[in-house]
Amino acid sequence: MRKRRARCRAVGTRAPILVDAKANARWSLDFVHDQFACGRRFRVLNIVDDVTRECLAAVPDTSISGRRVARELTDLIRRRGKPGMIVADHGTGFTSNAILAWAKDAGVDQRIRNGGDSSRYRMKVPAQVSPMDIWLV
């Protein structure tokens, strides 16, 4: 059996993203997945203001495309104002052409996190509680 070669990793230090300590300075976007008792899966798009730690939107649906994410962000900007930057992971819902075009048209700085970084931003809940229970409260 052949031994796999080690992955090449970026060399250098990571610098934190500096933001102002005011509302709408940075929004984080992430998906949460779960399934109903019948086995049907659904996703929840969570949009969180990182400075105030306020959940700005939680959009549940069985399928959320990049166009839908852009539409929800447009509605949220209409209600709350434009964010300084948006941070998301490498998911297909956030790196699609629809989101890239939306960010350019809206004039919002979009940053993409590395895959392993998203664990620091997850909400910690007990194992017995599903994301749907939190949304229904």
Image (cartoon, rainbow, N blue to C red):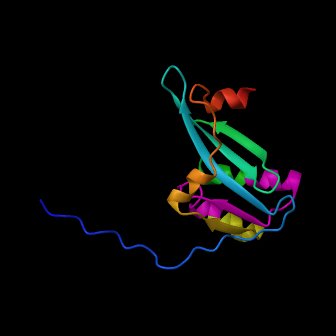
**In the depicted view, which residue is nearer to us: 109 or 98?**
109
**In the depicted view, which residue is nearer to us: 63 or 4?**
4
Task: Say if the magenta span includes residue 52.
Answer: no
Q: Which residues are magenta?
A: 73-99
Above or below 100: residue 135: above
Give the x, y percent position of residue 131. Answer: 63, 33
Image quarter of the C terminus: top right
Residue pushed farthest bottom? 12
**Residue at the (87%, 62%) spot, across then down:** 22
**In the depicted view, which residue is nearer to us: 53 or 109?**
53
The answer to whether residue 112 is left or right of residue 85 is left
**Residue at the (69%, 70%) spot, across then down:** 17
**Residue at the (82%, 56%) spot, across then down:** 77
**In the depicted view, which residue is nearer to us: 77 or 12?**
12
Above or below 37: residue 33: below
Task: Say if the magenta span includes residue 75.
Answer: yes
Residue pushed farthest left? 1
Q: In this orientation, does residue 63 appear?
A: no
Give the x, y percent position of residue 67. Answer: 64, 53
Residue pushed farthest top? 38
